[in-house]
Image: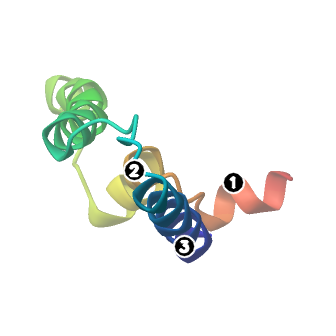
Amino acid sequence: MYLISLGAGILAGLVYGLINVRSPAPPAIALVGLLGMLIGEQVVPVAKRVIEGTPITKAWFASECQPRITGVPNAKDDSKN
């Protein structure tokens, strides 16, 4: 899915380059900011677990935070669909 998205973006960029049109895509710094927002959203569930005294395990992070950051559903989410 990521490779298809990247390929579509490259193709669009080539077309824009050929017709001398500036891309409406945000600059890279804005995309880095969006990544920061995704990561920052996960501070809340982590902080809640710390306050509750519940351990933050790799398995919990992989099932609860990682899918929200990467956009890739975990196996638990796949079984619901």
Q: What is the C-alpha distance between the residues marked 3 and 1?
A: 27 Å
Name above or below for residue 36 compared with residue 5. Answer: above
* SS type, badge 1: helix
Please, which residue is most extreme toward the front here? 19
Name above or below for residue 51 compared with residue 62. Answer: above
Quadrant containing the N terminus is bottom right
Which residue lies under the disc numbered 1?
A: 77
Circle 3 crowding by C-alpha within 10 Å: few under 14, some 14–19, many from 20? few
Q: Nearer the viewer, mark 3 or mark 1?
A: 3
Q: Which mark is residue 20?
A: 2
- The amino acid type, in three-letter code, at marker 2 is Asn
In this picture, residue 44 sits left or right of residue 24: left
Q: What is the C-alpha distance between the residues marked 2 and 1?
A: 43 Å
Q: Residue at x 61, y 72 (%)?
A: 4
Which residue lies under the disc numbered 3?
A: 7
- The amino acid type, in three-letter code, at marker 3 is Gly
Q: Earlier in the sequence, mark 3 or mark 1?
A: 3
Q: What is the C-alpha distance between the residues marked 2 and 3?
A: 20 Å
Provide residue 72's location: percent of width, then percent of height: 54, 59
63 and 54: which is toward the camera: 63
* SS type, badge 3: helix
55 and 71: which is toward the camera: 71
- The amino acid type, in three-letter code, at marker 1 is Asp
In this picture, residue 52 sits left or right of residue 10: left
